[in-house]
Image (cartoon, rainbow, N blue to C red):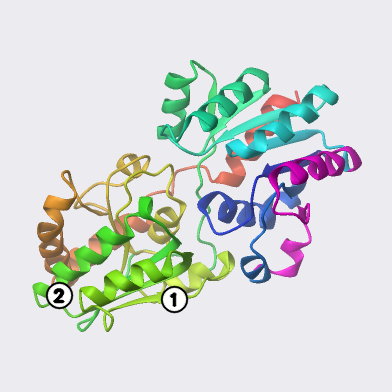
Amino acid sequence: MLKVIHIVPTFELGGVQTGIVFSLMELRKEIDYKVLVVGKTDMNWMKTIPINIRENILTTGTNEWIAGSIKALRILRDTNPDIIINSLWKSVPTSIIYKAINPRVKLIAFHHTARFVHLANYLSLKLLTLVCNQLIADSEATSGYIKKIYSKKNVSVVPYYFPVKHQVYSGKNIHHGKIKIVYFGRFKPEKGISRSIRFCAKLKELGADFHFDLFGEGLESRYQEEINKLNLSDRIHLRELLSPVSVGEKMDEYDFLLQLSDHEGMAAAVVEAMGHGLVPIVTPVGEIANYSRDGYNAIWLKDNFEDNLFSLAEKVIQVSKKPQLFRSLSENASKTFDSKNSYIESLIGAIQSNFQK
């Protein structure tokens, strides 16, 4: 059985790490798959992960990047993997050094963003593309970015799509009463949390009866202050972090997912929510613009984002008052990825096609 180590710089709430938790649940049926965390591990989040998954996450026991990199190299030496998958730029030194020490190992560069973050990010990933055996991306948008920025042609897409399995969804019904809106993820500026709060202020201004729950962690005090200033503390609530494996069940309690990000890759939370029949209220950035369509399986906040919050609020209220329209949007959302290969299928296919010839 192939021995695969997936290296990440940290293990805390985020789309990349959430996807890895799901992959640990499935990939081990096909390959010997473990995750190696170079640096910081959020133990509060780790504790929410079932023990049978958690035991396959290898940590260095340090928050220090350099010390963690050295310890990670020792772990790699002891585990002796056939394949290394590298996610995120701070993992690159560990992956490249081990590849130099052990040229036999196959190195897969996994890209998760379709934007230029900063110079260190660019240079690290550029170096990774030069020495890796294979390039994969979490979406077509990320793939296109990698091909353009790093001048690479062969980039396989391994989408962050994990099918909903516990129930077959064919659309939700919206009931009269409160509009139930939710968000899952980090509380940070690029996720558009402030914009989402201002959007909710527009909903209130228009007389909508709604509540908005945000599950995650990050800059809680900052956003709670913004909520209080707009007198929305009775409508918007910052909730505690959830285990990735319990997010799907919680999604079933809501009508809409609200995520007004400035930029995205695949946007894993949006994909998962659509699988559960939630209607996503989103900015068409990154891969979201490719798999969603305004008025068909999603509601878009169009450019210029800040100028259109009021019209977006009007549109959402209209949808909430038309059960048949909501049902259609929900049904279309739930079927968006029916004909698509999942993350697990795509990753196993990429590994087998390149390393088991």
Return the residue nearer the eye: 60 or 255.
60
* Magenta segment: 49-78
At a point 37% along the width and 67% down the height, the residue shown is 222
Quadrant assignment for the N terminus: top right
Where residue 100 appears, as percent x and y from the top left, is: 80, 22
The numbered dot on residue 239 is 1
Where residue 178 appears, as percent x and y from the top left, is: 23, 81
Q: 10 Å neighbourhood of mark 1: few (<14), some, or many (≥20)?
A: some
Q: Amino acid at mark 1?
A: Arg
Return the residue nearer the eye: 282 or 255.
282
Say if 116 sits above or below 260 in the image: above
Describe the element under mark 2 as helix, strand or loop: helix
Is 44 on the left-hand or right-hand side of 331?
right
Q: Is residue 167 visible?
A: no
Q: Amino acid at mark 2?
A: Lys
| Spatial CA span between label 2 and label 1 | 20 Å
Q: How many marks?
A: 2
Describe the element under mark 1 as helix, strand or loop: strand
